[in-house]
């Protein structure tokens, strides 16, 4: 049983970055307006994600650590809820299995919050606490009971860098939410939370606004693309080249990568890659549900259609901009 728990956890919780990603997605699911992330020792010492979302009620708090019982699919509206990625109710369960976790939460209308503490998935305590509305999840000593996994991790700096990049990307995707990231006690990043996507994007890439070609197109019923493309500043190799989101989740997509590459065909000097932030919204039924357990790579039911539509719209934009 212990072993099964740890193996299951490994699928979802590969590294500190995956913990941050799952916790931040939960905060977004809870409709938070402000999300603060604190990392210590690259996340192995401590990860705290604090939000002002709807919270978890006293009665439901112990259930948050149970597997598959908490799926809230029915309560999300169409655009937000993604049948493609599913809410599988196993993130907190998996994180709890390989750490010491505290979940504090207070729902609107309650005079106080409650804190649930568990070590290696075993509940230790549930007590009343004073706190603001929302949820604070603290994950300490990640992988303390799976030393092999801990050993496998790269430096804390690598991990902190990954986490920072994730926060910057998700902030661009949700410009109405204010994200703040603290690493080892220092405030490293803060987004505006004022719907200013373009500003966040140019800051992400270190570009002037004028150098960005913006995209915002309706391609069909429930089918939109939005974002920006640009050329990298001369002589600067760029690590944050291409960011894709499908239905409000950051994803990898071979077909979107190819659509962009081919749209630029013969418009760029050899070897030069454009900077791309592309958000695609499609009807839920267009996305292939059963692809990657980590929900990173997305596949469309009709890959060819997505490829052609995206390539065409971007190609036209580029050609028009040139003339
Ligand atoms: P899932 O998100 O797939 O439902 P999780 O294990 O990530 O599963 O979370 C379990 C449940 O705990 C969620 O469905 C939600 O009800 C609750 N929850 C987790 N984090 C938060 C949060 N930050 N705010 C409000 N509710 C939360
Ligand atoms: Mg979740």
Image (tube, rainbow, N blue to C red):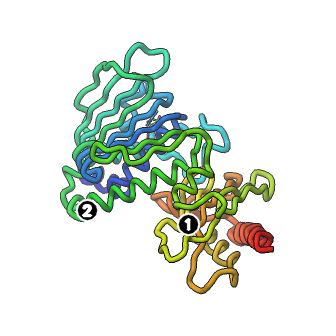
* Residue depicted at 53% across the width and 68% down the height: 241
Give the side of residue 89 with respect to residue 223, left or right: left
- Mark 1 sits near ligand 2, with its Cβ under 8 Å away: no
**In the image, is 87 to the left or to the right of 259?**
left
Is 171 situated above or below 219?
above
Q: Height in image: 60 above or below 186? A: above
How far apart in space, not on screen, are marks 2 and 1 (Cα)? 24 Å
Q: Is residue 134 visible?
A: yes
Q: Looking at the image, do the residues carrying marks 2 and 1 touch, with CB atoms under 8 Å apart?
A: no
* Residue 305 in view here: no
Mark 2: secondary structure: loop
Foreground residue, 27 or 317? 317
Q: Mark number for residue 300?
A: none
Classify residue 8 by image quadrant: bottom left
Q: Residue at x 66, y 60 (%)?
A: 210
Q: Which residue position is annotated with label 2?
A: 155
Foreground residue, 245 or 187? Answer: 187
Q: Position of residue 38 (x, y in %)?
A: 34, 42
Q: Quadrant of residue 301?
A: bottom right
Q: State how many labels appear.
A: 2
Q: In the picture shown, does residue 116 fall above or below 226?
A: above
Label 1 packing within 10 angstroms: few (<14), some (14-19), many (20+): some
Q: Secondary structure at mark 1?
A: strand
Q: Which x, y percent locates residue 33? A: 53, 34
Relative to 270, say whether 67 is above or below. Answer: above
Q: Position of residue 16 (x, y in %)?
A: 33, 53
Residue behind label 2 places its C-beta within 8 angstroms of ligand 1? no
What residue did someone put label 1 on? 242
Assess disc 2: are there few (<14), some (14-19) or many (≥20) residues with their C-alpha within 10 Å of its C-alpha. Answer: few
Q: Quick one: 269 or 107, which is closer to the camera?
A: 269
């Amino acid at each position: 049983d212990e072993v099964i728990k740890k193996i299951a956890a490994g699928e979802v919780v590969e590294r500190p970055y995956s913990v941050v990603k799952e916790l931040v997605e939960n905060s977004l699911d809870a409709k938070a307006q402000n999300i603060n992330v604190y990392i210590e020792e690259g996340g192995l010492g401590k990860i705290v994600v604090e939000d002002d979302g709807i919270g978890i009620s006293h009665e439901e708090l112990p259930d948050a650590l149970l597997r598959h019982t908490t799926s809230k699919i029915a309560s999300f509206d169409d655009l937000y809820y993604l049948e493609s990625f599913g809410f599988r109710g196993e993130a907190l369960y998996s994180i709890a299995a390989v750490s010491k976790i505290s979940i504090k939460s207070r729902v609107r209308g309650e005079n106080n919050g409650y804190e649930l503490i568990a070590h290696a998935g075993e509940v230790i305590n549930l007590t009343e606490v004073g706190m603001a509305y929302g949820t604070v999840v603290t994950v300490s000593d990640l992988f303390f009971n799976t030393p092999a996994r801990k050993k496998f991790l790269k430096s804390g700096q690598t991990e902190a860098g990954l986490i920072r990049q994730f926060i910057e990307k998700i902030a661009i995707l949700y410009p109405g939410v204010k994200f703040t990231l603290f690493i080892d006690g220092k405030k490293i990043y803060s987004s505006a939370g004022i719907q200013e996507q373009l500003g966040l994007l140019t800051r992400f890439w270190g570009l002037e606004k004028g150098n960005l070609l913006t995209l915002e197109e309706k391609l069909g019923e429930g089918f939109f693309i939005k974002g920006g493309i640009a050329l990298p500043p001369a002589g600067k190799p760029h690590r944050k080249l291409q960011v894709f989101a499908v239905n409000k989740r950051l994803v990898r997509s071979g077909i979107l990568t190819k659509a962009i590459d081919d749209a630029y065909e013969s418009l760029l000097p050899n070897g030069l890659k454009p900077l791309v932030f592309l958000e695609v919204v499609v009807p839920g039924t267009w996305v292939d549900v059963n692809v990657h357990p980590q929900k990173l790579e997305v596949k469309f039911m009709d890959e060819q259609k997505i490829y052609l539509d995206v390539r065409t719209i971007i190609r036209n934009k580029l050609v028009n901009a040139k003339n």
